[in-house]
Image: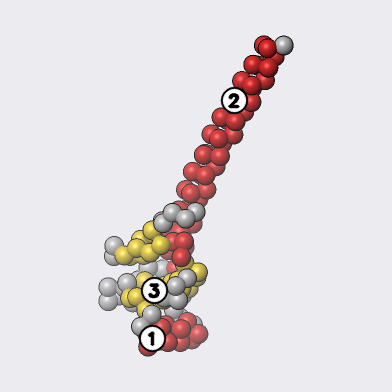
Amino acid sequence: MDAFRFINIGFGNTVNAGKIIAIVSPDSAPIRRLVANARENGRTVDATQGRKTKAVLVMENDRIILSALLPETIRARVQSGREDLMSETNEMTGEMMNEEIGSTEDEHHTQQAGE
């Protein structure tokens, strides 16, 4: 899971989904303080394009990203990407298991033929 997977957070702006710690609504006082502190310290990335902030993304690198999309929309995009990744992983695992089963059966038939 070291691969970068970017999701759209609105207006063509993307973030690395693997670095998101939280996706929260900006309405509560603690989140407003968090955003204000991040702005003061230069840790805020405003991706709203001048629109109302509807979601705050807290990132691993101590950055705060502001988005004009709803938290539910961003969460759904992150989840759908993880499900895609899970299905790809399951498909790859299934293929590897089928290859192993096939080679084990071949070895078994080879051993029986040699007897």
Residue at 59% x, 25% y: name it: 102
- Mark 2 = which residue? 102
What's the amino acid at mark 3?
Ile
Q: What quarter of the picture does the C terminus occupy? A: top right
Q: Depth check: give the residue in front, 76 or 60.
A: 60
Q: How far apart are marks 3 and 1 (CA)?
A: 13 Å
Image quarter of residue 103: top right
Secondary structure state at the residue bearing disc 1: loop
Numbered-mark total? 3
Figure check: 19 above or below 80: below
For this orientation, the residue located farthest to the front is 114
Image quarter of residue 98: top right
- Mark 1 = which residue? 41
Residue at 37% x, 68% y: name it: 69
Q: Depth check: give the residue in front, 113 or 72.
A: 113
What's the amino acid at mark 1?
Asn
Q: Look at the image and tell me whether residue 73 can be seen.
A: no
Q: Look at the image and tell me whether residue 48 can be seen.
A: yes
Of marks 3 and 1, which one's residue comes earlier in the chain? 1
Figure check: 64 above or below 16: below
Secondary structure state at the residue bearing disc 2: helix
Indicate the colouring scheme.
secondary structure
